[in-house]
Amino acid sequence: MDLKKEIKLSDLLPGKRKSAKPEPEAQPEAEAKPQKERKPLLKRELSFKRKPKEPKAPKEPRAKKERKPRGSSSNKRAKRLVGLKIGASQLAAARVVNNGSPELVQIARKDLEPGLVVGGELREPELLADELRAFFRENGLPRQGVRLGIANNRIGVRIFEIAGISDSQQLENAVRFRAQEVLPIPLEEAVIDFQELSRRTDEEGNPVVRILLVVAYRELIDRYVTACKKAGLRLSGIDLEAFALLRALAEPRLEEDGPSEAAIVVVSIGHDRSTFAVSDGRVCEFTRVLEWGGSTLNVAIARELNVAPSEAAPFKRNLSLTGDGVPEGLTAEQAPVVREAVRRQLQNFARELVSSLQFYQNQPGSLGIGEIVITGGTAHLGGLAEELQKLIGVRVSVGDPLTRVKLGRKVKEAEQLGSLAVAIGLGIED
């Protein structure tokens, strides 16, 4: 499976549920106190080379897939999707026509009142339904073909292998049994979905299937589904934000391209949390939600200026961490103090990233880290990528959410396009 394929989480929709127990995500390491001198946090802590895998029997030869030219049409009817991201501070939607090369035909955003969504948990389904109803009406968005994105630390992603089973029904039962062994929550509280990634034959001639398993708490999903249903939206699927990010920012590799030498690492910096995803170029191998977002910088700036965090947001947008200029609204004395406050908070964020990278690289077969691609509204802060690169010691760049799509005639490139990356990825169908 290449990462372009959506795991629709069809079982998370009403009437199609599978139960399993989720394993808690590994917790990031305790934060060390910021050092006065900003040195790379990694040094020799992260590897830039592939970690050896345990020896496996060679795969059977497979016929190469023909690569379809970009923009080529097929006999299938173009699939039209509305990618919908529900964040802590805003709604974001992207309407995409998938016909060969995906075309972005509409984008829309709307601010949300604080408290509706906190830490990825929907607190007020009724109020969100009202917001969604108004959002779709005001922007003339289709109410069918909506794909919803979710991101939460109570959603687990696991990759494992099952040997000796070729029958599809037996494989499904084996996956559910395996999930119950490794994911400890009560069956009645969880739903699962899985995707077959690849098949091979071991030394004894038995089939071995590689499985990607996604597990979520039922209550978490039901709240979002209920809100969408009350708003009159017809969901075509539910997808992890990590998968959508990878679809939006990275062209997937085909098997004939050979193995990748470096992992694709994408980080979307949201309002109160950030989504971290690692891929080998075909499938998301690791994902985690970090409890750090752009609002952390708002609080730091507000503390220095003695204002409310909501009042600090415009100062953050005008700020740059490069140079000694004075942003609009700040005095010559305030500017360096605010920059230093932001840099202190970025040290904490860098440690979170390092901890997640180290956890990934402890897994068999992990790849070297060549680059970290950041997106989200906060990624547009001037000098942010350069500052993180100094702290981590790995190249950091700002991703372009339009990498995989062409713009429709009526779509104008918006400001802070990074905050639309997840919605655009949700709209892409491969």
Image (spheres, rainbow, N blue to C red):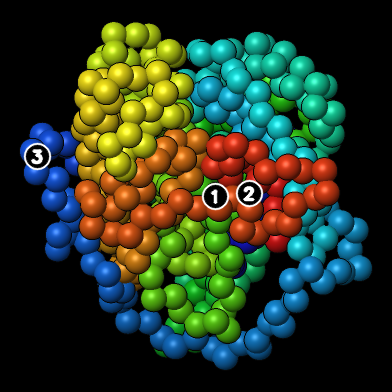
> Which one is closest to the eye, mark 3 or mark 1?
3
Seen from the viewer's position, the closer of residues 77 and 363 is 77
Question: Which quadrant is the C terminus positioned in?
Answer: bottom right
Query: Is any atom of residue 271 visible in this view?
Result: yes
Give me the C-alpha separation between circle 3 and circle 1.
32 Å
Nearest to N terminus: mark 3 or mark 1: 3
Mark 2 and mark 1 residues within 8 Å of each other at the beta carbon: yes
Tag 3: amino acid: Gln
Task: Tell me where residue 347 sits by quadrant.
Answer: top left
- Image quadrant where residue 145 sits: top right
What's the amino acid at mark 1? Leu
Left or right for 264, reference 82: left
Q: Position of residue 109 (x, y in %)?
A: 66, 29
Q: Is residue 279 above or below residue 227?
A: below
Badge 2 element: helix
Residue placed under numbered mark 1 in the picture? 245
Q: Residues within 10 Å of mark 1 (few under 14, many from 20)?
A: many
Q: Is residue 268 above or below residue 89?
A: below
Q: Which numbered dot is residue 109?
A: none
Residue located at (65% from left, 16% from top): 128
Q: Which residue is mark 3?
A: 35
At x 55% / y 61%, what residue is drawn?
250
| Disc 2: which residue | 425
In the displayed structure, 356 sits above or below 168; it is above
Residue at the spot 9% in from the left edge and 44% down from the top edge:
37
Mark 2 and mark 3: Cα distance apart in space? 37 Å
